[in-house]
């Protein structure tokens, strides 16, 4: 097959100066906006590619809750050992998803959008987005925005200034409650990806007191 041209963005970032970094992140953000602009009104919410544990539902909240249960059934016992206040957090999070989450759009969501899934060329333009896979779903594009705004957890050498300007842009594009959704989807992604071999991402986020507190858990 043809080899896709470009370099993974996470390997590029540490060598860039501040202006180049800003440009790279801007292109990264714009690329997911394009993917998220695909409307899928005729499909149910949930996963697009059907494998044995794929789920769809008539409401986005329902899809998230069923997916959460599916993950916890498999990995809950293990998470319980590592996460403080595990069962009260789960109850709180379920209520939050049921009652506080409003999905206004029905769009294509990548759901695995991180720096290492984006190739850029020498001018820092995005040349390919990788891994549109079994994670891809029909739903709320803010799930991907949360990915963009929390990737700093995964990439060494990222600093907060790098993405403060993206937060501002996300508020303009998605409304002032984007911070609430970034926090909520950060935790959802941590549950969702708790089956990765390296569970540090999941555990670090699910034990992040500030994120839970901002959502109203104390």
Image (spheres, helix red, strand yellow):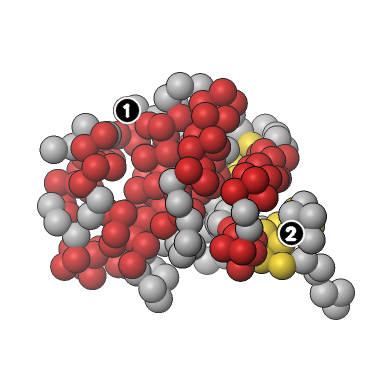
Q: Is residue 115 above or below residue 196?
A: above
Q: Residue at x 86, y 74 (%)?
A: 2
Q: Earlier in the sequence, mark 2 or mark 1?
A: 1
Residue 98: x %, y % from top left: 33, 33
The quadrant the N terminus occupies is bottom right
Q: Nearer the viewer, residue 78 or 112?
A: 112
Residue occupying the point 21% across, 46% down: 209
Marking on residue 120: 2
* The quadrant where residue 121 appears: bottom right
Secondary-structure class at tag 2 = strand
Quadrant of the snapshot with the C terminus: top left
- The disc placed on residue 153 is none
Determine whether, in the image, residue 100 is placed left or right of residue 112: left
| Residue 54 in view in this figure | yes
Mark 2 is surrounded, within 10 Å at the Cα level, by few (under 14), some (14 to 19) or many (20 or more) other residues, namely: many
Q: Is residue 194 above or below residue 207?
A: below
Q: Nearer the viewer, residue 211 or 139?
A: 211
**At 35% from the left edge and 48% from the top edge, which residue is drawn?**
187
Question: So how many labels did they put on this image?
Answer: 2
According to the image, label 1 marks what residue? 99
Q: Secondary structure at mark 1?
A: helix
Q: Nearer the viewer, mark 2 or mark 1?
A: 2
Q: CA distance from mark 2 to mark 1?
A: 39 Å
Q: Position of residue 105 (x, y in %)?
A: 59, 29
Give the answer, above or below, for where 151 lies relative to 139. below
């Amino acid at each position: 097959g043809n080899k896709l041209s470009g370099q993974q963005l996470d390997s590029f970032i540490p060598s860039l100066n501040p202006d180049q970094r800003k440009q790279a992140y801007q292109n990264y953000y714009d690329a997911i906006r394009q993917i998220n602009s695909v409307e899928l009104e005729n499909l149910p919410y949930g996963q697009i590619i059907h494998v044995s544990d794929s789920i769809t539902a008539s409401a986005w909240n329902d899809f998230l809750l069923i997916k959460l249960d599916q993950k916890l059934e498999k990995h809950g016992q293990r998470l319980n050992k590592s996460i403080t206040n595990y069962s009260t957090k789960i109850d709180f999070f379920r209520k939050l998803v049921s009652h506080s989450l409003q999905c206004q759009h029905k769009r294509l969501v990548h759901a695995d959008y991180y720096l290492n899934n984006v190739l850029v060329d020498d001018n820092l333009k995005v040349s390919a987005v990788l891994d549109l896979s079994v994670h891809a779903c029909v739903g709320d594009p803010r799930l991907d925005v949360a990915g963009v705004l929390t990737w700093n957890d995964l990439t060494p050498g990222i600093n907060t200034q790098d993405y403060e300007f993206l937060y501002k842009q996300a508020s303009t594009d998605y409304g002032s409650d984007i911070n609430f959704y970034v926090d909520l989807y950060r935790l959802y992604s941590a549950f969702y990806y708790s089956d990765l071999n390296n569970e540090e991402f999941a555990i670090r986020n699910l034990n992040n007191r500030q994120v839970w507190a901002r959502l109203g858990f104390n």
